[in-house]
Image (cartoon, rainbow, N blue to C red):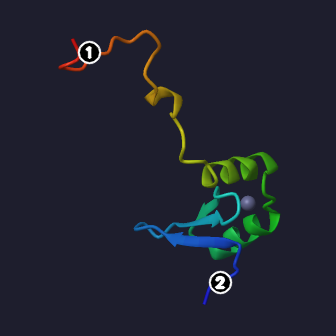
Amino acid sequence: MFTTQPFVHRTNADGVIDSFCRKCLITIASSQWEAELDRAERNHQCDPIQLEYVRGVLNRPQASGTSASEAPPGSLQPPPYGNS
Ligand SMILES: [Zn+2]
């Protein structure tokens, strides 16, 4: 079942817990204390600019560099054999 929690916690090897926002993907807080993370999460508001950026990265079209694959104008092509 998919959880709808807006924040993800990751515990590091040194015991510090990182809290990420699922929506804007930034690290909200890093602390050993859950209460501190909780407070930061309560105060967190997604930055609209960051949200736009995340949306743009996730929805980036794969068709980049189509013009780069075109042959440059004036490029010399070798004549086909048997046509002379
Ligand atoms: Zn956020």
Residue 61, placed above or below residue 77: below
Q: Amino acid at mark 1?
A: Pro
Which residue is most to the bottom? Answer: 1
Q: Which residue bears the numbered disc 1?
A: 79
Q: Amino acid at mark 2?
A: Thr
Q: Residues within 10 Å of mark 1 (few under 14, many from 20)?
A: few
Q: Position of residue 44 (x, y in %)?
A: 78, 61
Which residue is most to the left? Answer: 82
Q: Residues within 10 Å of mark 2 (few under 14, many from 20)?
A: few
Name which quarter of the figure residue 82 lies in: top left
Residue 60, placed above or below residue 25: above
Decide which of 2, 5 is in the foreground and name it: 2
Mark in front: 2 vs 1: 1
Mark-to-mark CA distance, 2 and 1? 63 Å
| Residue at position x 75%, y 49% in the image | 52
| Residue at position x 80%, y 69% in the image | 42
Residue 3 image label? 2
Left or right of 2, for residue 76: left
Q: Quadrant of ligand 1?
A: bottom right
Decide which of 18, 62 is in the foreground and name it: 62
Residue 10 image label? none
Element assignment for label 2? loop
